[in-house]
Amino acid sequence: MRITPLLRPFDGAGRTAAFLAAGVLVQLAAALVLAVPWLDGGPTRALSCLLALLAGFAVLGAATPVLTRMQRARFLGRRGVGIPAPGRRWSWRQVSYHLLFGPLLALGGACVLTLWAAAGAAASVYVWIWVLPPETRLGQAGYTTQAAYATVAGAAGLYAAAWLSSALQELDVRVAGARLGPSRTEQLARRVEDLTARRSEVVAATDAERRRIERDLHDGAQQRLVSLAVNLGLAKVTLGDLPDDARKVIDDAHREAKEAIEELSDLVRGLHPAVLEDRGLDAALSGLADRAPLPVGVRVDLPARPAPAIEAVAYFVVSEALANVVKHAEAARADVSVERRGGILLVVVSDDGVGGADFTGGTGLAGLAKRVASVDGTFSISSPAGGPTVVTVELPCAL
């Protein structure tokens, strides 16, 4: 429904007035808590007055959780604003709202509601004045002129009440959000927890996607290449009367098919080796050691398998570290150790090479450090010139 500019200030005025009225009622409950000792005349001596005040404040503090829930229900039901529950059931911030800010806002709300009533009565004077007996109206000389002034003043009062209601409502929302909701520290802590949980979900989803791609490549493209290589091999054996040029083409295609199978196998293992998912870190790392062109000692001491995302990171740490050993370290031997210490999965890869490795130089170790950091792990490397090089990674097993 389209609202004319003249009536736009009154859009939602009824909901705003109901919101303010509910605030006055809720705050009256808090006021009654403080007024109980004074209902029967109250104490007369200074000490008794002080004790009565302290008792009222103590009762108000005890009632703070209830009053806070009432106010939060008011904001949600009347304004559609959800104030998150604070981390603690009781705090001085909440008490300050019910003891200071709430009464002031309720007083402002009562004044605005009174203005609504008075302005409405004045603006509608021409309506209800006819309810009076005729002799009463006729007995007031110039009542029509006075009614005109009252109508104008009432209309102005209605506009003022609409503006004040909206302003007071917004002020109440801001103050309540700051005083009744979680503190800034609690909000930051919740934000950190939320971001941590979302990052864990992203890491888990990424790892699951890697496993899906690995299965698709292994069961699809790799099997097709194997079938192609087998058929080419059979062609070489069975088609003995082929020209030399045709035989050479088949030989080249057969060799390239086998090389493609090998490259695809390496790619699949790099994405997520099937043995890691089926048999765990011990078997997967032993496979890495067997394929390495130098002796690699592997020691895995795990009472139970860690989370799949942590297993994947640990595997790639060892895989990348051993690849760097083969490419750059000029080492004669490497050793891999994986063990659990409390809530930490400790991964250590060492070699007896020339040293001098630096993960800050933009090498593969830098990407490895980022991969470790994605699961809140820590990455460190010791690689003095002349060796040895020791890569140490700590991964949280609780992820």
Image (spheres, rainbow, N blue to C red):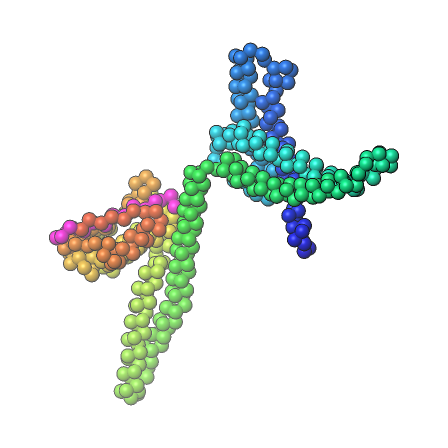
Q: Which residues are magenta?
A: 384-399
Residue 264: image location, x then y, percent: 33, 67
Q: Residue furthest front?
A: 141
Is 167 on the left or on the right of 143, as rendered? left
**Who is closer to the viewer here, 374 or 353?**
374
Residue 123 seen in this snapshot = no
Residue 27: image location, x then y, percent: 60, 30
Residue 222 quadrant: bottom left
Q: Residue at x 49, y 38 (%)?
A: 178
Q: Residue at x 52, y 16 (%)?
A: 50
**Who is closer to the viewer here, 18 or 134?**
134
Rendered position, 293 above or below 96: below
Rendered position, 257 above or below 240: above
Q: Residue at x 71, y 43 (%)?
A: 152
The N terminus - image quarter: bottom right
Rendered position, 331 above or below 142: below
Residue 58 seen in this snapshot = yes
Residue 157: image location, x then y, percent: 67, 41
Is 382 on the left or on the right of 86, as rendered? left
**Total count of labels:** 0
Q: Residue furthest top?
A: 45
Check residue 213 for magenta coloring.
no
Residue 62 quadrant: top right
Check residue 388 for magenta coloring.
yes
**Who is closer to the viewer here, 83 or 274?**
83
Rendered position, 199 above or below 221: above
Q: Residue at x 69, y 41 (%)?
A: 153
**Who is closer to the viewer here, 99 or 320?**
99
Residue 376: image location, x then y, percent: 34, 47
